[in-house]
Amino acid sequence: MNTYSKTTKMPRKAWTDDEVRALCVLYQRMLTAQRDGVKFVKAKPVREIAASMARSKGSVEAKLMNVSGCRHAIGRDYVNGYKPLSGFAKSMPAIVAECVR
């Protein structure tokens, strides 16, 4: 059974572990810039990674909020602007923890 996007009525594609790892790399770059006090704009890299994954910008941003949720759950800081979401896939905390090491 397919699930469908509410806005586009297109079938949703499950996130792969490799896609989540790629988002974790992007997330870590943004978090490092935030910690270092370096001004950064999230929109351009988010658009680029969304295009490379054939995903919407909103989909990528929601998954980045899931990364924040996983980090928050293990007591780690998160990127301002990506409020932690708790409804993440069961496999996601392990992938995020792997990227935190």
Image: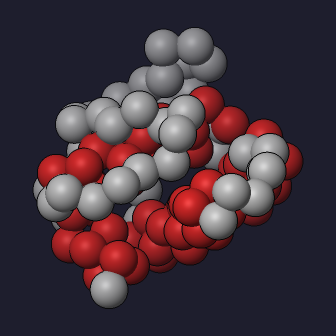
Q: Residue furthest top?
A: 7
In the rendering, at what x and y percent does residue 89 appear? 23, 51
In the foreground, 6 or 80:
80
Residue 51 seen in the figure: no
Q: Is residue 98 left or right of residue 8?
A: left
- Residue at x 32%, y 68% (from the top left corner): 96
Q: Residue furthest front?
A: 37
In the foreground, 89 or 96:
96
- Residue at x 76%, y 58% (from the top left corner): 38
Q: Residue furthest bottom?
A: 101
In the rendering, at what x and y percent does residue 74 appear? 16, 60
Q: Is residue 40 left or right of residue 71?
A: right
In the foreground, 1 or 71:
71
How many numbered callouts?
Answer: 0
Up/down of 27 relative to 57, above or below:
below
Up/down of 5 relative to 25, above or below:
above
- Residue at x 42%, y 40% (from the top left corner): 65
In terms of image quadrants, where is residue 97?
bottom left
Up/down of 63 relative to 16, above or below:
above
Quarter of the picture holding the N terminus: top left
In the foreground, 33 or 22:
33
In the rendering, at what x and y percent does residue 47 appear? 78, 46
In terms of image quadrants, where is residue 22?
bottom right
- Residue at x 65%, y 65% (from the top left corner): 36
Residue 98 seen in the figure: yes
Q: Is residue 4 left or right of residue 93?
A: right
